[in-house]
């Protein structure tokens, strides 16, 4: 589960995204336990409150849930939730931006589609 921290983005968001990545990739299955906030903190050498903020963000989204006295677990349906969330973000961050730029450059939708097909 090793990855490099990106200084330009909040650490708690990176922790949440790392957990999401592990869910998408099947490393963390539904109903499996995730590392504790203290384990995340020790592993990444960060403040436990920062790790907790990332984990709690996923709890708020229904991706993780807490079993009192045991720890955090991946919720049923979490993979689909993460996939939908990521697809929406992909659309907004990449597709919409690409279409705007194509319009500025006078690239038609047909030309853009052909460019994508050539690379795909």
Image (tube, helix red, strand yellow):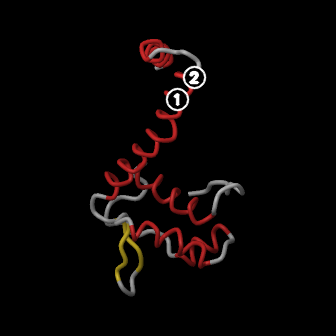
> In the image, residue 9 lies at what x, y percent?
65, 57
Q: Residue 61's image quarter?
A: bottom left
Give the residue at x 62% y 73%: 41
Give the residue at x 43% y 54%: 27
Q: Nearer the viewer, residue 29 or 113?
A: 113
Q: Residue 8's image quarter?
A: bottom right
Q: Is residue 94 above or below residue 118?
A: below
Question: Secondary structure beneath disc 2?
Answer: helix
Give the residue at x 56% y 26%: 101
Q: Nearer the viewer, residue 40 or 59?
A: 59
Query: Which residue, as the protein is rendered here, is positioned at the far bottom?
Result: 69
> Badge 2 local density, few (<14 within 10 Å), some, or many (20+)?
few
Quick one: quadrant of the N terminus? bottom right
Q: Is residue 88 above or below residue 104?
A: below
- CB-based contact (under 8 Å), mark 2 and mark 1: yes
Q: Which mark is residue 100?
A: 1
> In the image, residue 18 lies at what x, y percent?
53, 57
Relative placement, left or right, of 5 versus 90 is: right
Q: Which residue is mark 2?
A: 104
> Badge 1 local density, few (<14 within 10 Å), some, or many (20+)?
few
Between the residue at mark 2 and the residue at mark 1, the CA separation in whole angstroms equals 6 Å
> In the image, residue 53 lies at what x, y percent?
53, 73
Q: Nearer the viewer, residue 12 or 93?
A: 93
């Amino acid at each position: 589960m090793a990855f490099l921290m990106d200084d330009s983005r909040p650490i708690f968001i990176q922790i949440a995204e790392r957990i999401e990545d592990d869910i998408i990739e099947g490393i963390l299955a539904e109903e499996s336990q995730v590392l504790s906030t203290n384990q995340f903190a020790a592993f990444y050498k960060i403040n436990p409150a920062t790790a907790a903020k990332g984990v709690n963000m996923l709890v708020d989204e229904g991706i993780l849930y807490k079993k009192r006295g045991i720890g955090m677990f991946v919720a049923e349906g979490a993979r689909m939730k993460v996939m939908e969330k990521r697809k929406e973000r992909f659309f907004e961050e990449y597709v919409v931006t690409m279409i705007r730029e194509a319009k500025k450059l006078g690239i038609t939708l047909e030309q853009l589609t052909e460019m994508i097909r050539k690379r795909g």
